[in-house]
Image: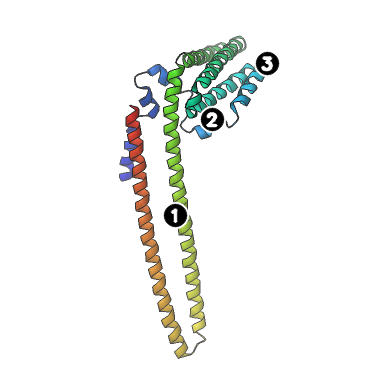
Amino acid sequence: MWKKKEAKKEEKEEHLLKQLCGDDAKLYDALGSYLYENPLVAISKEDLEILIEEAEKSVEDEDYREARQRYMRAMDKAIFEAAQNPGERSRYVRVIQDLASKAAKVTEKVKEIVEKEGPADYASSARSLFEGSIRKCEFLSERIEDVTKIASLFYNEKLEELGAMGRREARREERRDADSKEEMEDKKAGERREAGREERKEMGRGERREAEIGDKGEEKKERERREARRKEGREAEGEEKRIEEEEKERREARRKELR
Protein backbone atom coordinates (compact mmCIF):
# COMPACT_ATOMS: atom_id res chain seq x y z
CA MET A 1 0.00 0.00 0.00
CA TRP A 2 2.80 2.39 0.93
CA LYS A 3 4.56 1.77 -2.40
CA LYS A 4 1.34 2.45 -4.31
CA LYS A 5 0.90 5.78 -2.52
CA GLU A 6 4.50 6.73 -3.29
CA ALA A 7 4.03 5.81 -6.96
CA LYS A 8 0.91 8.00 -7.19
CA LYS A 9 2.79 10.85 -5.54
CA GLU A 10 5.58 10.56 -8.14
CA GLU A 11 3.01 10.53 -10.96
CA LYS A 12 1.65 13.85 -9.74
CA GLU A 13 5.10 15.47 -9.75
CA GLU A 14 5.34 18.09 -12.49
CA HIS A 15 7.51 17.18 -15.46
CA LEU A 16 10.85 18.98 -15.25
CA LEU A 17 10.87 20.35 -18.80
CA LYS A 18 7.34 21.69 -18.47
CA GLN A 19 8.31 23.25 -15.18
CA LEU A 20 11.30 24.96 -16.75
CA CYS A 21 9.35 26.24 -19.75
CA GLY A 22 6.44 27.50 -17.64
CA ASP A 23 3.63 28.91 -19.78
CA ASP A 24 5.77 28.97 -22.93
CA ALA A 25 3.97 26.14 -24.76
CA LYS A 26 5.88 26.66 -28.01
CA LEU A 27 9.24 26.36 -26.27
CA TYR A 28 8.08 23.25 -24.42
CA ASP A 29 6.79 21.64 -27.61
CA ALA A 30 10.00 22.34 -29.52
CA LEU A 31 12.39 21.23 -26.79
CA GLY A 32 10.40 18.05 -26.28
CA SER A 33 11.84 16.92 -29.62
CA TYR A 34 15.47 17.73 -28.76
CA LEU A 35 15.99 16.97 -25.05
CA TYR A 36 16.24 13.50 -23.54
CA GLU A 37 15.58 12.05 -20.10
CA ASN A 38 18.83 10.08 -20.33
CA PRO A 39 21.22 11.95 -22.64
CA LEU A 40 24.05 9.54 -21.86
CA VAL A 41 22.12 6.80 -23.66
CA ALA A 42 20.13 8.75 -26.26
CA ILE A 43 22.78 11.11 -27.64
CA SER A 44 25.41 9.87 -30.08
CA LYS A 45 28.89 9.14 -28.72
CA GLU A 46 30.44 10.28 -32.01
CA ASP A 47 32.26 13.62 -32.08
CA LEU A 48 30.07 16.51 -33.19
CA GLU A 49 32.41 17.26 -36.10
CA ILE A 50 32.07 13.70 -37.38
CA LEU A 51 28.27 13.83 -37.14
CA ILE A 52 28.24 17.06 -39.15
CA GLU A 53 30.62 15.63 -41.77
CA GLU A 54 28.41 12.55 -42.16
CA ALA A 55 25.32 14.73 -42.62
CA GLU A 56 27.04 16.87 -45.26
CA LYS A 57 28.28 13.75 -47.06
CA SER A 58 24.68 12.51 -47.25
CA VAL A 59 23.64 15.85 -48.76
CA GLU A 60 26.40 15.51 -51.37
CA ASP A 61 25.08 12.04 -52.17
CA GLU A 62 21.55 13.50 -52.37
CA ASP A 63 20.42 11.05 -49.70
CA TYR A 64 18.22 13.64 -48.02
CA ARG A 65 16.41 11.26 -45.70
CA GLU A 66 19.70 10.12 -44.22
CA ALA A 67 20.99 13.70 -44.15
CA ARG A 68 17.94 14.80 -42.20
CA GLN A 69 18.46 12.11 -39.55
CA ARG A 70 22.14 12.93 -39.26
CA TYR A 71 21.55 16.66 -38.93
CA MET A 72 19.03 15.92 -36.18
CA ARG A 73 21.55 13.77 -34.33
CA ALA A 74 24.14 16.50 -34.70
CA MET A 75 21.71 19.09 -33.28
CA ASP A 76 20.97 16.85 -30.31
CA LYS A 77 24.70 16.54 -29.69
CA ALA A 78 25.36 20.28 -30.08
CA ILE A 79 22.55 21.22 -27.68
CA PHE A 80 23.87 18.77 -25.09
CA GLU A 81 27.44 19.98 -25.43
CA ALA A 82 26.30 23.60 -25.22
CA ALA A 83 24.60 22.76 -21.92
CA GLN A 84 27.80 21.17 -20.61
CA ASN A 85 30.13 23.95 -21.80
CA PRO A 86 28.59 27.29 -20.80
CA GLY A 87 31.86 29.10 -21.47
CA GLU A 88 31.61 28.15 -25.16
CA ARG A 89 27.89 28.77 -25.52
CA SER A 90 28.25 31.53 -28.12
CA ARG A 91 30.15 29.15 -30.40
CA TYR A 92 27.57 26.41 -29.96
CA VAL A 93 24.76 28.88 -30.63
CA ARG A 94 26.19 29.50 -34.09
CA VAL A 95 26.65 25.78 -34.68
CA ILE A 96 23.10 24.93 -33.60
CA GLN A 97 21.59 27.68 -35.74
CA ASP A 98 23.56 26.48 -38.76
CA LEU A 99 22.48 22.87 -38.16
CA ALA A 100 18.85 23.91 -37.70
CA SER A 101 18.93 25.79 -40.98
CA LYS A 102 20.47 22.85 -42.85
CA ALA A 103 18.08 20.37 -41.21
CA ALA A 104 15.12 22.51 -42.32
CA LYS A 105 16.43 22.60 -45.90
CA VAL A 106 16.91 18.83 -46.20
CA THR A 107 13.56 18.23 -44.53
CA GLU A 108 11.99 20.39 -47.23
CA LYS A 109 13.74 18.19 -49.81
CA VAL A 110 12.38 15.03 -48.17
CA LYS A 111 8.89 16.53 -48.10
CA GLU A 112 9.07 17.24 -51.82
CA ILE A 113 10.22 13.68 -52.57
CA VAL A 114 7.43 12.16 -50.51
CA GLU A 115 4.82 14.38 -52.15
CA LYS A 116 5.99 13.24 -55.62
CA GLU A 117 6.55 9.56 -54.92
CA GLY A 118 4.21 8.57 -52.08
CA PRO A 119 0.49 7.70 -52.14
CA ALA A 120 -1.82 10.69 -51.65
CA ASP A 121 -2.94 9.78 -48.12
CA TYR A 122 0.61 9.07 -46.97
CA ALA A 123 1.94 12.20 -48.67
CA SER A 124 -0.62 14.34 -46.85
CA SER A 125 0.21 13.02 -43.39
CA ALA A 126 3.96 13.09 -44.12
CA ARG A 127 3.70 16.68 -45.35
CA SER A 128 2.15 17.71 -42.04
CA LEU A 129 4.89 15.88 -40.12
CA PHE A 130 7.74 17.42 -42.11
CA GLU A 131 6.24 20.91 -42.01
CA GLY A 132 6.03 20.63 -38.23
CA SER A 133 9.67 19.56 -38.12
CA ILE A 134 10.69 22.54 -40.26
CA ARG A 135 8.82 24.93 -37.98
CA LYS A 136 10.58 23.47 -34.95
CA CYS A 137 13.96 23.96 -36.61
CA GLU A 138 13.10 27.58 -37.39
CA PHE A 139 11.80 28.13 -33.87
CA LEU A 140 14.96 26.56 -32.43
CA SER A 141 17.09 29.05 -34.33
CA GLU A 142 14.90 32.06 -33.44
CA ARG A 143 14.78 31.22 -29.72
CA ILE A 144 18.31 29.85 -29.45
CA GLU A 145 19.18 31.76 -26.25
CA ASP A 146 16.14 30.36 -24.44
CA VAL A 147 16.80 26.93 -25.91
CA THR A 148 20.39 26.74 -24.64
CA LYS A 149 19.42 28.16 -21.25
CA ILE A 150 16.61 25.65 -20.64
CA ALA A 151 18.70 22.81 -22.06
CA SER A 152 21.50 23.62 -19.61
CA LEU A 153 19.14 23.60 -16.62
CA PHE A 154 17.39 20.46 -17.83
CA TYR A 155 20.52 18.42 -18.54
CA ASN A 156 22.32 19.49 -15.37
CA GLU A 157 19.35 18.27 -13.36
CA LYS A 158 19.04 15.03 -15.31
CA LEU A 159 22.75 14.24 -15.01
CA GLU A 160 22.55 14.84 -11.27
CA GLU A 161 19.60 12.45 -11.02
CA LEU A 162 21.42 9.83 -13.09
CA GLY A 163 24.49 10.21 -10.90
CA ALA A 164 22.39 9.69 -7.78
CA MET A 165 20.83 6.58 -9.33
CA GLY A 166 24.28 5.24 -10.18
CA ARG A 167 25.50 5.79 -6.63
CA ARG A 168 22.43 4.04 -5.21
CA GLU A 169 22.96 1.06 -7.50
CA ALA A 170 26.64 0.88 -6.50
CA ARG A 171 25.67 0.81 -2.81
CA ARG A 172 23.10 -1.90 -3.47
CA GLU A 173 25.66 -3.93 -5.40
CA GLU A 174 28.02 -3.71 -2.44
CA ARG A 175 25.27 -5.01 -0.16
CA ARG A 176 24.47 -7.84 -2.58
CA ASP A 177 28.16 -8.84 -2.61
CA ALA A 178 28.25 -8.76 1.19
CA ASP A 179 25.08 -10.88 1.41
CA SER A 180 26.56 -13.38 -1.05
CA LYS A 181 29.73 -13.69 1.04
CA GLU A 182 27.66 -14.18 4.19
CA GLU A 183 25.64 -16.93 2.54
CA MET A 184 28.84 -18.66 1.50
CA GLU A 185 30.23 -18.41 5.04
CA ASP A 186 27.01 -19.87 6.46
CA LYS A 187 27.16 -22.71 3.95
CA LYS A 188 30.77 -23.52 4.87
CA ALA A 189 29.91 -23.40 8.57
CA GLY A 190 27.08 -25.87 7.98
CA GLU A 191 29.42 -28.16 6.08
CA ARG A 192 31.92 -28.02 8.94
CA ARG A 193 29.21 -28.93 11.45
CA GLU A 194 28.09 -31.87 9.33
CA ALA A 195 31.69 -33.08 8.97
CA GLY A 196 32.11 -32.78 12.74
CA ARG A 197 29.04 -34.95 13.35
CA GLU A 198 30.45 -37.64 11.09
CA GLU A 199 33.81 -37.53 12.88
CA ARG A 200 32.15 -37.83 16.31
CA LYS A 201 30.60 -41.15 15.32
CA GLU A 202 34.09 -42.66 15.42
CA MET A 203 35.09 -40.99 18.71
CA GLY A 204 35.02 -42.32 22.19
CA ARG A 205 32.62 -40.94 24.77
CA GLY A 206 35.09 -38.47 26.29
CA GLU A 207 36.33 -37.19 22.97
CA ARG A 208 32.76 -36.85 21.72
CA ARG A 209 31.85 -34.81 24.77
CA GLU A 210 34.78 -32.43 24.24
CA ALA A 211 33.94 -32.09 20.55
CA GLU A 212 30.31 -31.28 21.34
CA ILE A 213 31.39 -28.57 23.77
CA GLY A 214 33.66 -27.13 21.08
CA ASP A 215 30.81 -27.23 18.55
CA LYS A 216 28.52 -25.36 20.91
CA GLY A 217 31.14 -22.66 21.27
CA GLU A 218 31.46 -22.39 17.49
CA GLU A 219 27.69 -22.26 17.08
CA LYS A 220 27.52 -19.45 19.62
CA LYS A 221 30.18 -17.52 17.70
CA GLU A 222 28.24 -18.08 14.45
CA ARG A 223 25.04 -16.77 16.05
CA GLU A 224 26.89 -13.71 17.25
CA ARG A 225 28.37 -13.15 13.76
CA ARG A 226 24.94 -13.50 12.15
CA GLU A 227 23.45 -11.05 14.62
CA ALA A 228 26.31 -8.61 13.96
CA ARG A 229 25.68 -8.94 10.20
CA ARG A 230 21.97 -8.36 10.66
CA LYS A 231 22.74 -5.28 12.71
CA GLU A 232 25.12 -4.03 10.02
CA GLY A 233 22.42 -4.70 7.41
CA ARG A 234 19.85 -2.67 9.36
CA GLU A 235 22.35 0.16 9.78
CA ALA A 236 23.18 0.04 6.05
CA GLU A 237 19.48 0.20 5.15
CA GLY A 238 19.04 3.14 7.49
CA GLU A 239 22.03 4.90 5.96
CA GLU A 240 20.68 4.21 2.47
CA LYS A 241 17.33 5.77 3.36
CA ARG A 242 19.07 8.77 4.91
CA ILE A 243 21.19 9.32 1.78
CA GLU A 244 18.15 8.94 -0.50
CA GLU A 245 16.20 11.47 1.59
CA GLU A 246 19.08 13.94 1.43
CA GLU A 247 19.36 13.52 -2.35
CA LYS A 248 15.60 13.96 -2.70
CA GLU A 249 15.69 17.14 -0.60
CA ARG A 250 18.54 18.52 -2.72
CA ARG A 251 16.61 17.76 -5.92
CA GLU A 252 13.49 19.46 -4.57
CA ALA A 253 15.53 22.47 -3.46
CA ARG A 254 17.13 22.77 -6.90
CA ARG A 255 13.77 22.52 -8.63
CA LYS A 256 12.36 25.26 -6.41
CA GLU A 257 15.27 27.47 -7.47
CA LEU A 258 14.42 26.80 -11.11
CA ARG A 259 10.82 27.97 -10.77
- Please, is residue 117 above or below residue 37 in the view? above
Residue at 38% in and 22% down = 21
| Label 2 element class | loop
Q: Position of residue 169 (x, y in %)?
A: 45, 46
Classify mark 1: helix, strand or loop.
Answer: helix
Numbered tag placed on residue 60 in the rendering: 3
Q: Pick whichever, 41 or 142, lies toward us.
A: 142
Examine the image and state in which quarter residue 227 appears.
Answer: bottom left
Q: CA distance from mark 1 to mark 2?
A: 32 Å
Which mark, residue 43? Answer: 2
Q: CA distance from mark 3 to mark 2?
A: 24 Å
Mark identifier at residue 175: 1
Residue 59, position as x, y percentages in the image: 65, 16
Of residues 66 and 138, the one nearer the viewer is 138
* 10 Å crowding of disc 3: few (<14), some (14-19), many (20+): few
Lower position in the chain sequence, tag 3 or tag 2: 2
Q: Residues within 10 Å of mark 1 (few under 14, many from 20)?
A: some
Q: Residues within 10 Å of mark 2 (few under 14, many from 20)?
A: some
Which comes sooner in the sequence, label 1 or label 2?
A: 2
Q: Which three-letter amino acid code belongs to the residue tagged 2?
A: Ile
**Contact check, label 1 and label 3, Cβ < 8 Å:** no
Direction from residue 100 to residue 53 in the image, left or right? right
Q: Is residue 182 left or right of residue 227?
A: right
- Compared to residue 88, the image places residue 227 above or below, namely below
Work out whether residue 41 can be spotted.
Answer: yes
Q: In this figure, which colouring scheme has been used for the structure?
A: rainbow
Kindly identify the amino acid type of the residue bearing the numbered disc 1.
Answer: Arg
- Determine the residue positioned at 46% across, 31% down: 37
Disc 1 and disc 2 in contact, CB within 8 angstroms: no
132 vs 160: above or below: above
Between 253 and 133, the residue placed more toward the observer is 253
